[in-house]
């Protein structure tokens, strides 16, 4: 499907050096789609390079990732680390 801005929330900011922590959840998209280039394009001005992002996809898989690329026109997240019990 597509990025839903209502499902993106900033949890906190660790200051300029530490970056921010974000949560994002999708009931429609698998992580492969979420990790695709420009999925977060509508939030490109909010998400800074190296900000952390905890993502829950449509299969309830949770991954810890970060903003890998943000040059003002293109944005991507890193591959992500799956969080398990």
Image (cartoon, rainbow, N blue to C red):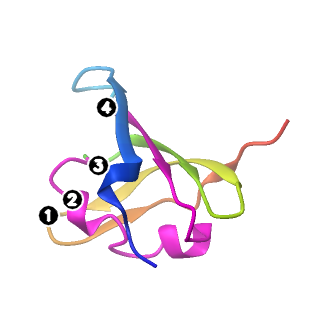
- Numbered circle sitting on residue 19: 4
Q: Classify residue 83 as left or right of residue 68.
A: right
Q: Classify residue 31 as left or right of residue 2.
A: right
Q: Is residue 23 a member of the stretch shown in magenta?
A: yes
The local crowd at label 1, few if under 14, some if 14 to 19, many if 20 or more residues have their Cα within 10 Å, is few
Residue placed at 15% from the left, 53% from the top?
Answer: 45
- Compute the Cα span from label 2 to label 3: 10 Å
- Compute the Cα span from label 1 to label 4: 17 Å
Residue placed at 37% from the left, 71% from the top?
Answer: 39
- Compute the Cα span from label 2 to label 4: 15 Å
Range covered by the magenta-colored residues: 20-47
- Compute the Cα span from label 1 to label 2: 7 Å
- Determine whether label 2 and label 4 are within 8 Å by CB: no
- Numbered circle sitting on residue 44: 2
Question: Which is closer to the viewer, label 1 or label 2?
Answer: 2
Q: Earlier in the sequence, mark 1 or mark 3?
A: 3
Q: Position of residue 33 (x, y in %)?
A: 52, 75
* Residue 35 visible in rendering: no
């Amino acid at each position: 499907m597509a990025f839903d801005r209502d499902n993106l929330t900033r949890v906190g900011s660790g200051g300029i050096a530490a970056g921010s922590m974000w949560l994002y959840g999708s009931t429609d998209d698998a992580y492969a789609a979420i990790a695709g280039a420009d999925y977060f394009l509508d939030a490109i001005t909010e998400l800074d390079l190296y900000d952390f992002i905890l993502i829950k996809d449509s299969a309830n898989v949770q991954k810890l990732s970060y903003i890998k690329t943000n040059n003002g026109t293109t944005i991507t997240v890193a591959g992500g680390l799956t969080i398990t019990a």
